[in-house]
Image (tube, rainbow, N blue to C red):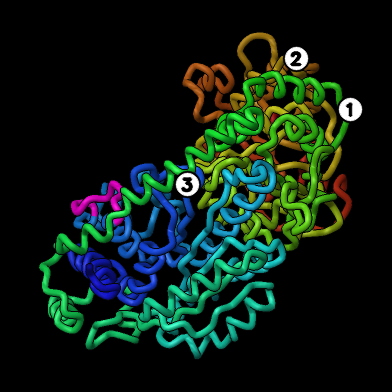
Amino acid sequence: MPTHRELANALRFLAIDAVQQANSGHPGAPLGMADMAEVLWRGFLRHNPSNPAWWDRDRFVLSNGHASALLYALLHLSGYPVGLEDLQGFRQLGSRTAGHPERDLTMGIETTTGPLGQGIANAVGLALAEKVLAARFNRPGLPVIDHYTWVFAGDGCLMEGVSHEAASLAGTFGLGKLICLYDDNGISIDGNVRGWFGDDTALRFEAYGWQVIRSVDGHDAVAVENAIRAAQAEPSRPSLICCKTVIGYGSPKRAGTAKAHGEPLGAEEIAAVRNQLGWEAPPFVVPDGIRVAWNAQAAGRAAETAWQELWARYRAQYPAPAEELQRRMEGKLPGDFGTVASQAIAAAAAAGPQATRVSSQGALNVFGAALSEMLGGSADLTGSNNTMHKASRAISTDQPDGNYLHYGVREFGMSAIMNGLALHGGFIPYGGTFLTFSDYARNAVRMAALMHQRVIHVYTHDSIGLGEDGPTHQPIEHAASLRLIPNLSVWRPADAVETAVAWSAALAREDGPAALLLTRQALPPLADAARANDIARGGYVLLDCEGTPDALVIATGSEIHIAAEAVKEAQAQGLRVRLVSMPSTDVFDRQDASWRDAVLPTSVTRRVVVEAGSTAGWWRYAGSQGRVLGIDRFGASGKAADLYRYFGLTAERISEALHELL
C-alpha cells in the first residue's frame, strides 16, 4: 500500500507538471497543500465521482482558487471525468481546466473561485443550506440531508473582508458541519505576510464563535487526520484548522518564498523537486498502485447506494416532503407556478399608487407563500427593502428551519452567501440592500452571473427619488453598471404590475441572476394585468399614437409616469409620439428582431430616453439623432420633487426635447 507521502506526491507532480506545460500557473500552493488534500479526500470526503451531482455529497470548496492545479489533480485521481488530456491542457483556450476553477458539476467542481475570500463565503451558504434543509426535511432515523462542507483557504482569503463578514455569520448561526482547513504558510505574492497581515487569526475566529484547532503540522498526515476528527466532534460550531505548511514544499530553491507562488518552477527546479521527494515517474505518469489507491469510485458508489436505501425508506414513509425536496433539489418550480404568477400580477393590478419596493413586498406575499424554496434576507434594511413577506420566519440557531436571514450590515457577504445557497440546491435566495450599496456586493453579483445561478438581488432606493439622504445614498451610475454585467438580468419596473412581472421572470429564470431596482417614492399605476406578457419581454409600447410615430420616448422605472405626462401632452397637440416602457434592457435585447422593431421602429430616429441616472448605455437606443435625459454627476440632498426639477427630469423638459427633435 502506498504511503501518505507517496499518495500526496502524485498530486504534487500532476499539478506542477500541468503548470510547467502551460508555462503559467501557481505551483507553490499545490506543493504545500498536497498532504492536507490527501488526508481529507481519501479519509473523510463523502462523495461519488460516478455521480458528482448526488444531493447528499459533501461539498468541497477550494477558496484559494489559484491552487486550481491541485483540485484538477484531485478530481483526476479520484475518478471524476477529468482526464490526463485535461491536465495537459491546463489554462489553454477551450480547456475544461481553466486557470481558476469554474463551477462544473459534471467534473466535480462545486463553485467558481479565484476572487479570494468568496469561496469561504460560498461555503457558508452551502453549509447553511445543509442545516436549513436538514431541519426542514429530516425525520427521526431518516437523515436524508446530512453532509459536511469543507474549505481550503489561504492567507489571502482571510485578508479579504468578505471572509470576515461570512465567518462572523457562520459562527452566529452555529454551522457545525462547516470545516475550513487554513493553509497557513505565511506567504503571499508580495512576500512574507507578517508585514501586512499581523492578525491573531485563531483568536479572531474564536471571537466569531468558531472552534479553532491551532498549529497543526500540515505535512503530517496523522496530525491533520486528528485535527479533522476533532472538528467533526464539535457539532455546534464551525471549525478552523490552522495547518502550518511550506509553500513550494520540496523545491530546493523556492520553498518558503514568494517565488514559489505564481510562476512555473522550470524544468531544472522540477527535476530537483523530483529528486528531493524521491518521485521517479516522468511527467503526467502515476504508478499503477498509487492510481488504484486514489480511485474513489467504488467507495463513492457504495456511499450513495446506502443513501439511496435511506431515501427509499423516507419516500415510502413521507411521500409529500420527499416530493417537495426532490422538486427543489432538481431546481423545478411548482407545477402551478404560472397560476401563482397570475395571482401576483392580478393583485398588483388592483394596487393604488405605491413605491415599487412596496409592490415588491406585495408580490413576495404571493410568491413566498407558494414557493418553499425562497429564502430571503436583507443587509440590515428589512423594513426599508420590504424583503420580509407574510410567511417569513427568521432563521436562528434555535429556529434553523426558517426562510429569512438577517444578514446584518454585510452586503458583500450576503451576496456571496446567497451564491452558496443557490449552488447547494434546494433554494432560490434573494436579498436586499440599497442600490448604491450594490457596489459593495458587485463581485459576488458578477460571480452569480458567471456561474449561471438563480439568485435575486433586491435593490431599493434606486434614484435621487430617495431624497434627503443625499449623494452618498443616491445611485447614479449603478443601474448602468449592473447592466454591463453579462448574464445579469436587470429590472427597473415602473409600477406594481411591472414589479410583479419582474419577480415572476426572476423566479422563472434558471440560468442566471436578476437584480430588481425599486423605488422609495410612490408611483402611480400605469400598466394592467393584460400587459403582463408584453412586460415580460423587457420593453413594450405603453402609450401609442395613431399611425407611425414621428418620435419615441423611452423611459424606465420612476421616470415612466413623468414621460407619460409629456407624451400625453404631445399627443394632445397633434404630435405622433409613442411611449415605450423599458423595464429590462437585457431581456428586450434577447427578443426576436420583429418584436424589437415593432416596439422601436428603426425608421423612427427621433428619440428621447429618460432615466434618473447615468446616460451611459442609453445612447444605443437613442441613436445619434436622439436625446438622453439623465444625470451624469453626483446627486444632492433635498426633497425628491425638488431634485427632479433641479436635474431637469420633468415633463416640461421632455416636451422641450421632443419639440427640439420635431
CA–CA distance between discs 3 and 2?
51 Å
The quadrant of the picture occupied by the C terminus is top right
Q: Position of residue 302 (x, y in %)?
A: 38, 46
Q: Is residue 340 left or right of residue 323?
A: right
- The label nearer to you, 3 versus 1, is 3
The quadrant of the picture occupied by the N terminus is bottom left
Q: Determine whether 368 is above or below 291 in the image.
A: above
Q: In this view, does 312 lie to the left or right of 380?
A: left
Q: Residue 574 carries which label?
A: 2
State the residue position of label 3: 451
Residues drawn in magenta: 78-86
Q: List the single residue furthest toward the bottom.
A: 195
| Residues under numbered marks 3 and 1 in contact, where contact means CB atoms less than 8 Å apart | no
User: Does the stretch in magenta take in 421?
Assistant: no
Q: Where is residue 105 in the image (x, y as percent from the top left)?
A: 41, 45
Q: List the single residue furthest toward the top.
A: 547
Q: Determine whether 7 is above or below 59 in the image.
A: below
Q: Nearer the viewer, residue 155 or 306?
A: 306
Q: Residue at x 82, y 26 (%)?
A: 525
User: Does the stretch in magenta take in 79?
Assistant: yes
Q: What element carries label 3?
A: loop
State the residue position of label 1: 352
CA–CA distance between discs 1 and 2?
30 Å
Residues packed near mark 2 inside 10 Å, few (<14), some (14 to 19) or many (20 plus): few
